[in-house]
Image (cartoon, helix red, strand yellow):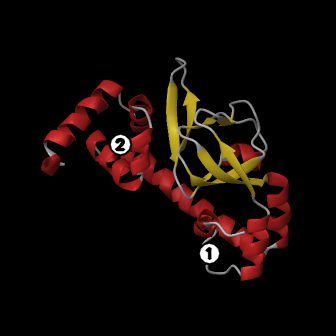
Amino acid sequence: MTSKALEICYDFPFFMQEELEEIFQAHEKVSFQKGDIILEEGKTANEYYILEKGLARSYVNDFSGNEVTTHFFADNEIIIEVLSLFQRIPSQENIVCITDCECWKFDFETFQELFHKIPNLREWGRSWMSKELFAYKQRSVEMFTLSVTRRYLNLLEQKSQVVQFAPLKQIASYLGVTDTSLSRIRKEIVSHPKKN
């Protein structure tokens, strides 16, 4: 079983071929339809997914009951709620499919078995977690240091699928602005592309 998404996600210099094969074989191919809930608030995550094709998002409900997008998951990324999965606690987030999604599921128990059996999987896990922590830290700083226009352009550059498929309201909540403001920013970008 070979998959470009699995190869990209587990691209780590120290894996031996037989280790990778064992890890790949532990994944199960699953499909979701647009609107399907992958993880619901209050439930404990029992797996993570490698997203081969599609777009998903995680969101929380704020104190007023509004949905606030916390993350978008695009092709070749890992769909995961780290706290719930590894701390074995109910999720505060919901994860839902924006489009139809093709994924590779890796259940928690099998992951734990291989995590203890294959030292390189532990090293890969540490490396992946460090990169994710850095990305989350950078995003939290950029929320205060970059203009909304710049943050939108960065999103467009890094995850064009989001701008293509996600509703304006979801993108706006992710960027921390109203959909009216984002709509105005998008119009400005189209009419004055050089200024940005």
Quadrant of residue 144 in the image? Answer: top left
Q: Residue at x 61, y 80 (%)?
A: 13
Residue neighbourhood size for the residue with mark 1, other residues' Cα within 10 Å, grouped as few (<14), some (14–19), many (≥20):
some
Quadrant of residue 93 in the image? Answer: top right
Task: Determine contact: label 1, label 2, CB under 8 Å.
Answer: no
* Along the line of sight, the residue nearer the viewer: 63 or 121: 121
Where is residue 192 shown, x and y percent of the image?
Answer: 13, 43
The quarter of the rendered structure image containing the N terminus is bottom right
Is 82 situated left or right of 74 in this image?
right
Where is residue 38 shown, x and y percent of the image?
Answer: 67, 39
Q: For mark 1, give the secondary structure.
A: loop
* Along the line of sight, the residue nearer the viewer: 51 or 122: 51
Where is residue 31 shown, x and y percent of the image?
Answer: 67, 46
Q: Which amino acid, by three-letter code, is at mark 2?
A: Phe
Q: Can you tell which of label 1 and label 2 is closer to the viewer?
A: 1
Q: Which amino acid, by three-letter code, is at mark 1?
A: Phe
Where is residue 73 shown, x and y percent of the image?
Answer: 54, 48
Residue 174 vs 19, above or below: the answer is: above
Q: Residue at x 16, y 47 (%)?
A: 193
**Label of residue 97 in the image:** none
Which sits earlier in the primary sequence, circle 1 or circle 2? Answer: 1
Residue topped by disc 1 = 12
Q: Give the farthest residue toward the top.
A: 64
Number of numbered discs overlaid on the protein picture? 2
Q: Residue at x 60, y 46 (%)?
A: 101
Is 93 situated left or right of 44 in this image?
left
Q: For marks 1 and 2, give the CA distance.
A: 33 Å
Q: For mark 2, give the secondary structure.
A: helix
Residue topped by disc 2 = 144
